[in-house]
Image (spheres, rainbow, N blue to C red):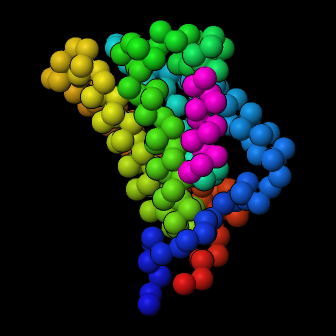
Amino acid sequence: MTDVAFSSSKPSFSPLRLQDRSLAWQVGAVVLGTLFLALSSYIEVPMVPVPVTMQTFAVTLIGALYGWRLGAITIAAWLVEGAVGFPVLSGGAAGASHFVGPTGGYLFAFPLVGALVGWLAERGWNGNRVVLAFVAMLLGNLACLVLGTMWLAAMIGAEQAVTFGFLPFLLGGLLKSALGAATLMALPGGKAKPANP
């Protein structure tokens, strides 16, 4: 049978090979990942009610590099840091109030997005197949927008939520997905050998 994107039962690509590392390495990766996510939060374009940031770029890249389990754990750890008061959210914001405000749906979507992109990357949607890597990251960005917009709709209505919480972010999602796929391809080991069928 020919190579199928979903056929691999083991991760076929991981330039960091975190699944093969010790617990100490994995904990260190989580810490570095939360720092990367925090830094991405400071790159923002203020908009109302939801700012444009590089967070989804970081979330999808963490998922693709760390795999679905460790990626989701890392993103959840970063959100906990923000909830307890560390200035790691958009523009250095912090506090649990951000999880019940207009951005709450997007924040809660992040671990799911990282897990989705990581799961797809482990099945070959990665730097070895740059078009599939782009599609995986685009699906992650769309999932974040859909979930965030649904949350926002409960606060300001569906039409306003789509107008202010979905449409303005589509172009950014496309660009961040392309940048994420290019980053994966450029990393050492980005062109992994195909998994055995």
In the rendered image, residue 113 lying in the magenta stretch gets the answer no
Where does the image place residue 40, in percent across and percent down from the top left? 59, 29
In the rendered image, residue 79 lying in the magenta stretch gets the answer yes
Identified at 44% across, 77% down, the residue is: 4
The quadrant of the image that shows the N terminus is bottom left
Q: Quadrant of residue 27?
A: top right
Q: Is residue 158 left or right of residue 120?
A: left
Q: Quadrant of residue 52?
A: top left
The quadrant of the image that shows the C terminus is bottom right
Q: Looking at the image, can residue 68 be seen?
A: yes
Q: Quadrant of residue 194?
A: bottom right
Q: Which stretch is magenta?
A: 68-80
Q: Is residue 52 left or right of residue 79?
A: left
Q: Nearer the viewer, residue 102 or 58?
A: 102
Magenta segment main secondary structure:
helix
Where does the image place residue 170, in percent across and percent down from the top left? 32, 37
Where does the image place residue 35, in percent across and percent down from the top left? 70, 29
Q: Farthest left residue?
A: 159
Where does the image place residue 76, in percent across and percent down from the top left? 58, 32
Q: Looking at the image, can residue 176 be seen?
A: no
Work out whether 173 lies above or below 125: above
Q: Nearer the viewer, residue 75 or 93?
A: 75
Identified at 60% across, 77% down, the residue is: 195
Identified at 29% across, 28% down, the residue is: 149
Q: Is residue 10 left or right of residue 19?
A: left
